[in-house]
Each structure stands twice: as structure tokens, then as C-alpha cells.
Amino acid sequence: MRFRLRYLHHDLELTEGPFVIGRSAGCQLSLDDPLVSRRHAILRVVGDCVTIEDDQSRNGIVVNGVRIEEPTELRSGDRIVVGSQELTLVGPGVDGEPARTMAFGKRTLPKLPSLVPMTDPHPSPTSPPVAAPVEAEMDPTMVRRAQAFALLSGVAEKALAMGRSEEAERLLAGPLSDIADASRGGKQLSRALVAVVARLAAKLATATSKGGWVDYVIELYCLQERPCPAVVVDELNTAVRRVSAVDLGRLREYVALLHEKQSTFGPAERFLVQRIEGLERLAALR
């Protein structure tokens, strides 16, 4: 019998043996959630039986609303909560909404398919997580971060859509900081990943009225030395009208950098520079 673990509209195929869930990149399913321990839960598949046990986590495991204290056999349809993430065990022959399937061997990291491209700038809260395709030249550590962020971003999008800005900020603050640090350290990031990260940071600025998230986006694209894409500029225009203060000096430095690089840009990027100049003027009026 084949079992799958459904998470964020994706089906993770379970194979015989242990399947570890936790925050560590060495887990079969790595969840970038501060409420998840490095090794949090272990699923075991033996024949047509699936069990779950707590791997000495801080916050425990909840199955169908009840916290478990010992290894527990699961049935198809059981809901599992690890940290703030909900997963569902799906067994053979169970009808449900279509989901993308990913195969997992023992001790492997999750591999995401090509997810929603940036041509869909306004995904619905229930759509699959918007994430960048992983580029071949990316550093292996950034590949793992991109995969983890892809899973987490869907949860954060839902929290923002439901007005739970503090929850979304709590989920995203650590990963966004890690990605900024990686960019400062010269790590290779895909353009699409940076766009997803920046758009979510701008949405956080609007939801929390904190100008620091606008500053985050500007610094990120200063490091990339290129204009923000249109979808990010749109979010920034909304955010600047909502936040109390923006680091105008940093924004002006970014505009000056773009002017220096303008000869290397194509027509579309030059138009984006003009829009970012408009963003600077808007911020100056605040």
C-alpha cells in the first residue's frame, strides 16, 4: 500500500521505513517554523501500517486534536499538527483535491517541482506556495533554503489573508533574515526567489505598518544591483502609503545605484527604474 503525506497542497510519497519531520535540513521534511524542533516527529511505514512518534520535541505532536504521548498508529485522513504546520495522512484510494506528488527515499531532502511562476503576481491564499525554481548554479545551502521557504510561504500567505499579521511575521522573520544574510555574504540567489521573498516582505510592511520591511526589500535589491520587478514595486507602493517611516536615505542610495547601472538595463528595466523613482518621491512626502 502507498501512503502520502499532504502538506500545503502537495503530496509527499512515503516509502517503507522512517520519515523524519523537523527543522533540520537533514530531515526528510524540513519545516522552517520556530515552533518545530530540529528533529520533531518520526513517521514509520511498515507494510500497510503507518505510525507517528514524538522525537523528544519541545512542543509535541497533535493528532486529530489530541496531543500524543507515545507511538500512535495513523489512519488515512488523520490530521497531524507539528509546530504550527498541519499535515494529513492520505491512504490509497482516498478521494481528495488534486495534489502534486513528490517521492521521498530514505534520508533525502524534499524536492519541489516548478511552482507558480512570477507571471501570477496575485496568487490566492489557497494556491500552492509561490516559489522560485531552483537554479542549477545556486549554492546547495541556498537550494535547501529555497525549498524550505517555498513550503513556509504558503502558510504565511494564508495567515496574511486571514488578517493574522503577527503570526505571518513570526513565521517569516527568521527565514527572511537568513536570506538577507546569504545575499550579503555573496550567495547566489535565483531572481524568482528574491522576487517572492521581497513581495512577502512588502506585504508584511503593509500588514504590520512597519517601515523596516520596506527597508528590507530595498536593501535586498541594492545587493542584487537591479530594479525590483513590477509585482514588488506594486506591493511597495501600497506599503509606503501604510507605514509610519521608511529609510529615505537607503531608498535614495538604491535609486542612485540604479542610475549608475542604467546603461546595462533593457527598456523594461528602465521603466521599472522610473517607477522606483516615483516610489522615492512618494516616500519623501510621508
Image: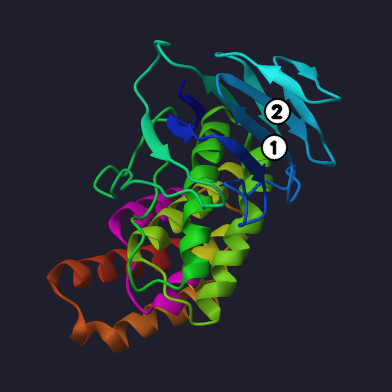
Q: Which mark is residue 42?
A: 1
Identify the residue at horizontal 62%, vertical 23% (top origin).
Answer: 50
Residue 170 vertical position relative to residue 54 in the rendered view, above or below: below
* Chain part drawn in magenta: 220-240
In front of the other: 184 or 83: 83
Q: Which mark is residue 52?
A: 2
Residue 239: say if magenta: yes
Name the outermost residue toward the left: 267
Could you say where residue 115 lies in the image, as x and y percent from the top left?
33, 45
Q: Amino acid at mark 1?
A: Ile
Identify the residue at horizontal 57%, vertical 47% (top origin).
Answer: 28
Identify the residue at horizontal 42%, vertical 68% (top origin).
Answer: 280
Q: How is the image coloured?
A: rainbow
Residue 111 shows in the view:
yes
SS at circle 2: strand
Q: Amino acid at mark 2?
A: Ile
Residue 245 shows in the view:
no
